[in-house]
């Protein structure tokens, strides 16, 4: 019994203090569970995207700390069919747990309900099923940002800076539930302020996003507030604004990259909204471990964002981005 209490405390310490080594000493590794669990982390993005590379690192670090096996699956470019195939592959392997993004509720619901019916615990990450509890996929917990609030906070930060004449958001993964929720949050604020706002469909391809945004800004020169929803949109947006010589445009974004932080430092980007994606990889592994060992699970969402990163705090955030933790 004493060993069980020690293990519970060690797991909780590992969940709450993943960066103990940064605080002046290496943390003691928790005892390994009696059996080696197999978990899958399945998302709609691959390691080439700077955002998902950090999620993967979080999952890998947690797997090493908790002494479990973790397999990461994600398409190189967002493709609903390929994403669903990956979920079905994981379910067929009958693992001890799955962490997954709910980017398309109708598409992922059948395989995830099958997993749950088989007794496979499921944790949602990054994008939740935003339907009411009685209607949504019955996963155990959600780890990620409030996507609608991400959009609201982004728009409010823009209006804190100035009153735009027109706003646009570039959606680099059209149909992605989280991206649509962010866009809806932005749109709600612009509607309250009586300022025109549009959604512009892009793609996971940076060159296509460059062309789409360039064409939009050329056709709508009064647009002076541009939003993007990740590095795959922000990086080409920075290039477009530079190429057009549009110093009057304020750029707001979501998520982090070194290039985006440098742009904030240089004054070329106003802000970005972060969601601490390392935690979206790390925490689900800990939660699934606790659930398999003791049936313990939080009874509410674990929100990792939103938080505004701008000129006031960019230096604090940059250190952890360069280290691969944000």
Image: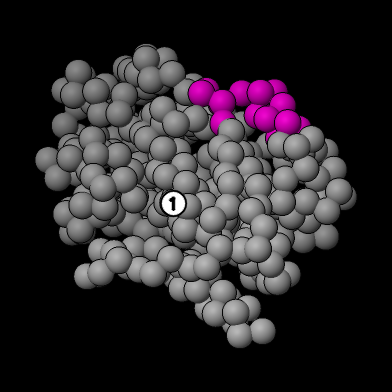
Please tell me whether the stretch drawn in magenta is mainly helix, strand or loop: helix
The image quadrant of residue 247 is top left
Residue 95 image offset from top left, x and y in percent: 72, 45
Q: Is residue 134 left or right of residue 282?
A: right
Residue 71 image offset from top left, x and y in percent: 58, 39
Quarter occupied by the N terminus: bottom right
Q: Is residue 218 above or below residue 30?
A: above
In the image, the segment drawn in magenta is 74-89
Asked if residue 150 is among those painted magenta in the image, a careful observer would answer no
**Which residue is drawn at the image coordinates 22% and 70% (left, top)?**
24
Residue 54 image offset from top left, x and y in percent: 40, 43
**Whether residue 256 can be seen here:** yes
Q: Which residue is nearer to you in this view: 306 or 284? A: 284
**Whether residue 159 can be seen here:** no
Q: Is residue 296 above or below residue 74?
A: below
For this orientation, the residue located farthest to the bottom is: 2
Residue position for label 1? 61
Q: Is residue 133 left or right of residue 27?
A: right
Secondary structure of the residue carrying tag 1 is: helix
**Which residue is drawn at the image coordinates 58% and 46% (left, top)?**
69
The image quadrant of residue 135 is bottom right
**Which residue is drawn at the image coordinates 33% and 56% (left, top)?**
308
Q: Is residue 282 above or below residue 89?
A: below
**Which residue is drawn at the image coordinates 70% and 62% (left, top)?**
292
Q: Is residue 115 left or right of residue 211?
A: right
């Amino acid at each position: 019994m004493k060993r069980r209490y020690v293990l519970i405390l060690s797991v909780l310490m590992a969940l709450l203090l993943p960066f103990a080594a940064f605080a002046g000493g290496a943390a003691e590794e928790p005892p390994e569970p009696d059996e080696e669990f197999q978990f899958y982390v399945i998302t709609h993005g691959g390691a080439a995207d700077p955002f998902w590379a950090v999620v993967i690192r979080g999952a890998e670090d947690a797997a090493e700390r908790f002494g479990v096996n973790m397999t990461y699956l994600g398409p190189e470019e967002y493709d609903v069919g390929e994403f669903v195939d990956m979920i079905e592959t994981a379910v067929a392997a009958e693992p001890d747990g799955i962490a997954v993004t709910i980017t398309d509720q109708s598409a992922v619901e059948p395989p995830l309900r099958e997993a749950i019916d088989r007794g496979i615990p499921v944790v949602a990450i990054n994008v939740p099923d935003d339907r009411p509890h009685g209607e949504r996929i019955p996963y155990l917990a959600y780890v990620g940002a409030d996507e609608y609030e991400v959009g609201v906070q982004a728009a409010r930060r823009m209006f804190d800076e100035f009153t735009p004449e027109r706003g646009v958001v570039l959606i680099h993964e059209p149909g992605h539930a989280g991206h649509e929720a962010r866009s809806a949050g932005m749109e709600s604020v612009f509607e309250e302020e009586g300022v025109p706002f549009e959604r512009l469909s892009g793609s996971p391809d940076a060159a296509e996003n460059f062309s789409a945004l360039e064409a939009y800004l050329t056709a709508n020169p009064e647009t002076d507030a541009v939003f993007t929803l990740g590095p795959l949109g922000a990086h080409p947006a920075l290039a477009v604004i530079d190429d057009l010589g549009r110093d009057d445009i304020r750029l707001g974004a979501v998520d982090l990259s070194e290039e985006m932080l440098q742009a904030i430092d240089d004054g070329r980007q106003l802000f970005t909204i972060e969601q601490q994606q390392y935690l979206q990889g790390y925490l689900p592994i800990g939660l699934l471990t606790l659930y398999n060992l003791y049936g313990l699970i939080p009874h509410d969402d674990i929100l990792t964002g939103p938080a505004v990163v701008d000129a006031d705090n960019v230096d604090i955030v940059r250190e952890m981005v360069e280290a691969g933790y944000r």
